[in-house]
Image: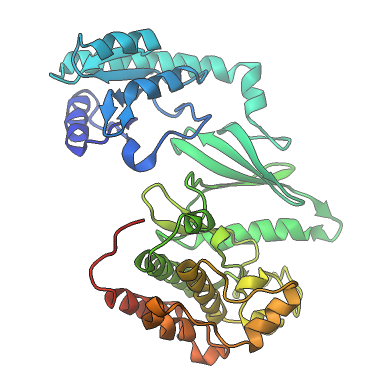
Amino acid sequence: MLIDDDPRYRTLLRHHISCDWPDVELVSYNPRVRGPLTPGFLAQGYSAVLLDHEWRGGSGLDWLRDFAGREGFAPVIFLSAADESPDAAEARAAGAYDVVGKAKIKHTKLNDAIRRAADEQAKAQSRWRMSAGSKMAQDFAGCRLKAYRRIDLIAKGSVSELFLAESAEVGGVVVLKVTPAVRKESGIDQSMERFLQEFEILRDVKHPNVVQIYDLGVTDDHLYLAMEHFARGDLRKRMSEGLTARQSLTYARDLAMALQAIHEVGILHRDLKPGNVMLRDDGSIALIDFGLAKHVALKMEVTDKGLIFGTPHYMSPEQGHGKEIDPRSDIYSLGVMLFEMLTGKKPFDADNHMAILVHHAKAPIPKLPERLSAIQSLIDTLMAKDAAARPADSEAAARLIQAAIDTLGAPETAQ
């Protein structure tokens, strides 16, 4: 793993390392783009970590001291300004496994340091796997998963528990969703059905704006799902920081394309809201949480017809009244989210959920501020009361949103 922000230097290092290991997998981590490593991450899936001494706005020595405080962190080879520069001495004192000067890379020295670090890491991992601590770290709600190391419990619900975990295979942090494999005389219970349906849904979707699933497993008494982790949080958090019209429309367009991807394989999300849209380190977004999604091709029904599931503030009129829905219901929810991104307010609010649902069905679509009046027709189309008046599919919605972006002219200054 290489922590550095200079693509040219990353290429140079890759060249040096590949001379001895042609098939080397050098994973680059840009600290200026991605920020600090997740607390609790130990880089256990890597033979060594190469750490640059500085980047714009960052100090490798500060990061090295942080890593030294993480028991079990992979060996760190510090890339100092020069072999005997002041930061080289500081790095050794701070716990670097070895120090290599950047000024003039010595091929033999670099690869020898990596070879020794890899050997040390292999021995350390072998010792750890035999320790009592490993058994505790591999316990997830009573389910032992040897391929993962527990970092923290994120959330505990009535059905599943969410954990932050490190995966050596992925080479990073993942979210593990674990649920008991409860069975009844009549077969598996509804919570298991929903869990399995969520995987069935996600397995067939490959899209850059949909959460990535790494693994599904079934033990004697648990099921688990390993998925992408989003250190930057959700769209709700991003909205609190303020969005420009361009940023709001760009997020909405990307969400529309994500919806098109799931709709094409027969999935209705049914719970589109800012909390179910996550931000990646590079600023892109990903749609998550398919727990309430419905796959029209699945014979298994996990909800009763006529019952209302979802979040009232974002429900289409038809969904809010327990009627049959199709992809245009998700498009309505997208329109609600776009309105909120643009204004900072939900289009409809009330003291109770039923009143909100009535507003969605009967109240006039609220107006955007005058400065955003050019986007009003888009909001009116996405949030049309009658599903037939909305875009026919999410791809068409994405085209309308892109057209609105094109009318904005030059890109706005990022906030």
Q: Quadrant of residue 128?
A: top right
Along the viewing direction, whichever of 48 and 8 lies nearer the viewer: 8
189 over 352 or under it: above or below: above
Residue at the right extreme of this rendering: 185
Where is residue 63? Give x, y as percent. Answer: 39, 24
Horizontal placement of 387 versus 133: left or right?
left
Q: State how the image is colored.
A: rainbow
Residue at 18% across, 21% down: 102
Residue 298 appears in view:
no
Residue 195 appears in view:
yes
Residue at 23% across, 15% down: 100
Where is residue 145? Give x, y as percent. Answer: 62, 34
Q: Quadrant of residue 154?
A: top right
Horizontal placement of 364 versus 367: left or right?
right
Where is residue 296? Give x, y as percent. Answer: 60, 75
Along the viewing direction, whichever of 184 and 393 lies nearer the viewer: 393
Residue at 61% across, 22% down: 134
Residue at 71% across, 44% down: 222
The quadrant of the rendering that contains the C terminus is bottom left
37 over 121 or under it: above or below: below
Where is residue 105? Give x, y as percent. Answer: 15, 19
Residue at the left extreme of this rendering: 104
Horizontal placement of 251 versus 289: left or right?
left
Tag count in the figure?
Answer: 0
Residue at the front extreme of this rendering: 370
The quadrant of the rendering that contains the N terminus is top left
263 over 244 or under it: above or below: below
